[in-house]
Image (cartoon, coloured by chain):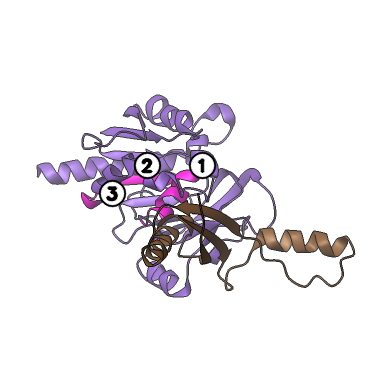
Amino acid sequence: MFLAKIYVTYKPSILDPKGETVKDALQRMDFTGVEDVVMGKYFEIKIASDDRASVEQEVQAFSEKLLINVNMEVFRYEIEAITE
Amino acid sequence: MKAAVITFPGSNCDLDMYHALVDEFQVDTEIIPATVTDLSQYDAIFIPGGFSYGDYLRTGAIARFAPVMAAIKEADNQGKLIVGICNGFQILTEAGLLPGALQTNTKPGFICDTTGLNVVNQTSKFTNAFTKATVKFPIAHGEGNYFVDDATLATMQANHQILFTYTDNPNGSVADIAGVTNANGNVFGMMPHPERAVDELIGNIDGRAFFASIIASLVNQQEATKA
């Protein structure tokens, strides 16, 4: 069994209105050091398999197909072996 | 002409669309659930607004994989008219039937208002009956900020795929874009709601020209097939 942790964010070229709104709020709350906020999505997906390479392929495939919109988002992931 | 209005779990403008087609334009229309896999008997397919699958993940992202979508792609292959309004537009971009993507409005929050639109191209299957260069349609969305990359935008402009632009951009859309077609000109999507502007009773009938355009192009198409 593997656990895939997948992080989805906007491409750097795309304005992130939710991140900007959170940044403005933090700055208003006097967290003056806050310079940038990226707001994304986080997934934990358990995959039954004993082959890390095929799990990587699967994560790559379903992330591109469903989890992100390739026009405006990117993703990165970590995979770890877990016991059930 | 036979029309289908597709309803997904979470669609909520299906009855407005049905009302516009049936009560205002006497179109033979059926409301079709997203589990249906054959749309071959319909000449035009309308994907209404709402929050399909709760807008979970992204607007339109899950609807794109609903059983009915294969039939919608098949209808596109046959050159049938496909219209997506609001969430329907989001679904069509997610499905790759229209270029670009819809993102969170630049100004935070859900906008519920009436917006001015320029009818940029009055020769399309969806705009041929417009007589005014500017119309007013209701809008109601939180994720109507249309994004498309520069290269695709240039192709769309060259192809006259942009049918409507906002007179006063409410959501941050690239190039003020409000409504677009695919390269073939048979699939159309827009965030504003023409189906909410067809009845004298509510004070705005600018949306009638949209439905009149679609009906006129289907009649022309049928006459061309006969001849």
Residue B66 on the magenta segment: no
* Front of the two marks 2 and 1: 2
Q: Disc 1: which chain?
A: B
Q: How far apart in space, not on screen, are marks 1 and 3 (Cα)?
A: 23 Å
| Residue B8 x, y percent position in the rendering | 43, 35
The magenta-colored residue range is B77-96
B80 left or right, relative to B210: left
Q: Disc 2: which chain?
A: B
- Residue on which disc 2 sits: B66
CB contact under 8 Å: marks 3 and 2: no
Q: Disc 3: which chain?
A: B
**Which is more toward the observer, B199 or B179?**
B179
**Which is more toward the observer, B68 or B105?**
B68
B144 left or right, relative to A55: right
For residue B70, say whether it is visible. yes
- Residue on which disc 3 sits: B73
> In the rendered view of the protein, which quadrant contains the N terminus of chain B?
top left
Color of chain A here? brown
- Residue on which disc 1 sits: B193
| Residue B89 x, y percent position in the rendering | 45, 49
Q: Which residue is at a point 41% across and 24% down the rendered structure image?
A: B23
Q: Earlier in the sequence, mark 3 or mark 2?
A: 2
Q: Are marks 2 and 1 on the same chain?
A: yes
Q: How far apart in space, not on screen, are marks 2 and 1 (Cα)?
A: 23 Å
CB contact under 8 Å: marks 2 and 1: no
Q: How far apart in space, not on screen, are marks 3 and 2 (Cα)?
A: 12 Å
> In the rendered view of the protein, which quadrant contains the C terminus of chain B?
top left
Color of chain B here? purple
Which residue type does callout 1 highlight?
His
Q: Which residue is at a point 13% across and 45% down the rendered structure image?
A: B225
